[in-house]
Structure formats: structure tokens, C-alpha cells
Amino acid sequence: MSALASRSWLAAAALFALFFLLPVAGLGLRALTDGDVASELRSGDSWRALRLSLVTATLATALAALLGTPLAYALARSGRAGSRLAAALIDLPIVLPPAAAGIALLTVFGRRGYLGGPLEELGVSLSFTTAAVVLAQLFVAGPYFVRSAYAGFRAADPRFEGVAYTLGLSRWRTFRSVTLPLVRPALAAGAVLCWARALGELGATLLFAGSLPGSTRTAPLAVLNAFESAAGLAGAVSISLLLVAVALAVMVALSRVTAPGGPYR
């Protein structure tokens, strides 16, 4: 590669990196120079919204791990042709527009939905509650865990399980003692990605759970509400800055549970 081509290549890489770094730097600079942002950072509303997001994202991730691990294992070990179609359907929320995901949840779990209506008659209301936030986050973020777990189970050599069976271990003991340790990095990475996606969920949550302070207004919804309220840009910047700090911590965690050298190795 010639010197000119090499410099052009590096310049293009630097410009693209700046494209990602400058908006984040802008948030930090705005927080340092704008006194209104500093006051909004001390606002209880911002921290309440962030706390709700952290709690609901953690609950959604726990459900995804509890229910998604056996599902991913069944799909990875199944030799049937329909397993690939099932995996594609489970991945669908990844590419589904968030607004469409929210409408889909309403049609099933809403007060007049196919399941929500009968549940409403039993006194159980899901839509526009904190439970709806968890369901919305689980619907859009759960596939990230299942996809990562599926890849881990597919990569794990089934011959290790066969050896355990010949030694007299039960299927559950083999799964717990042999298979899970082999795929632990994939499960951990999937959990981190699922949690991060749940934390940033907006569209499906807004349509299915609403934006009720203290019960369904998560941090992304608080950003939107602050931008449209008297707090304006300062309020939106303050909450966005909190989300950036949490997201940075998540990415550091992700780099620790993936291969040495980070997620790009």
C-alpha cells in the first residue's frame, strides 16, 4: 500500500471514529459549561427514571436468562429443519421497528388484547404498569441473549456431553456441570447485551407501558419528556449523560466477558 493510500485509510478511520466520539464529548462539554444541566443532574426525577430503568432492565435480563437458556439449548441441539425457522422468528424483534413491537404487545397483552382481556377480568392488568415495562424490554432485548446463548451452545462440542453420559451423569447434571461451564462466556456476553438493549428501550415501552412518572417512565422516556418540557435541552442532556455513563460501564463489562482483547478480537 502506498504512503498516500495509507494516510487516506487512516484519515477515513479517524473521521469515522470522531463521528462516534464527538456527540458523546458534546454531552460532557455541555454538562460542564451549562449550569442548568448541572442542576438537572441533581434532580430527583432524573435519578428516579434511571433507577426504574436499572431495575426493570435487570428483571428483563433475569427472565431472558431463565427462559432463554433452555430455549437456546433446545434450538442448538435440535436437528430438525423447523429449528432454524423458530430461531429466525425469535430473532424477529431485533429488526422489528420498536413502534410495531409496542403495537404487537398491545394486541396480545393490552386490556382488550387476546390474553390481556381475560387477565383483566381476573383482576390482572399488564399494560401501562411497571410489569409492562419489563415485558416490553424482554420482548425487544431477550433475542440478544438467546442469539448469543445459541451461538455458544452450537460451538460447544457435544462429545463432552456424550462422555459425561457414559460416566453415568444424568442429563441435568451433565448440563449443569459440563455444558454450562463451556458456554459461560457466551451466556455472560448475551446477558450484558440483553441488559444494555433493555436499558435503552423506548418505542415499545412508550406504546405498551406509557410514560407515567415513578411507574413506567424509564430513563429513555425521561429524556424525551424532558426535551419536550420546560427543562428543555438541559434536562435531556442530564439524563442522557447518566445513560452514557451506565452504557460505558456496560461496554467495559462486555469487554471483560468476551475474548481477551475485547469484543472485536
Image: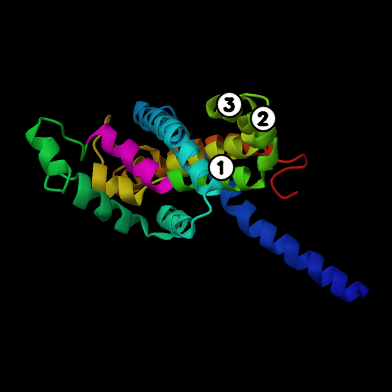
Residue nearest the observer in this picture, 89 or 34: 89
Residue under the image location 53 percent in, 53 percent down: 79
SS at circle 1:
helix
Q: List x then y, in percent, for residue 59.
A: 40, 30
Q: Amino acid at mark 3?
A: Arg
Residue under the image location 58 percent in, 26 percent down: 176
Q: Which residue occupies the extreme left position in the image?
A: 121
Q: Is residue 139 magenta?
A: yes
> On the image, numbered disc 2 is attached to which residue?
166
In the rendered structure, find residue 183 and report the number of the disc placed on it.
none
Q: Is residue 40 magenta?
A: no
Q: Quadrant of residue 15?
A: bottom right
CB of mark 2 within 8 Å of CB of mark 3? no
SS at circle 3:
helix
- Disc 2 residue crowd, few under 14, some 14–19, many 20+, Cα 10 Å: few
In the rendered image, the quadrant that contains the N terminus is: bottom right
> On the image, numbered disc 1 is attached to which residue?
149
Q: CA distance from mark 2 to mark 3?
A: 16 Å
Residue 68 seen in the current view: yes
In the rendered structure, find residue 176 and report the number of the disc placed on it.
3
Q: Amino acid at mark 2?
A: Thr
- Disc 3 residue crowd, few under 14, some 14–19, many 20+, Cα 10 Å: few
Q: List x then y, in percent, for residue 43.
A: 38, 28
Q: List x then y, in percent, for residue 80.
A: 49, 56
In magenta, the rendered stretch is 129-141
For marks 2 and 1 on the same chain, the one whose residue lies earlier in the sequence:
1
Residue nearest the observer in this picture, 42 or 218: 218
For marks 1 and 3 on the same chain, the one whose residue lies earlier in the sequence:
1
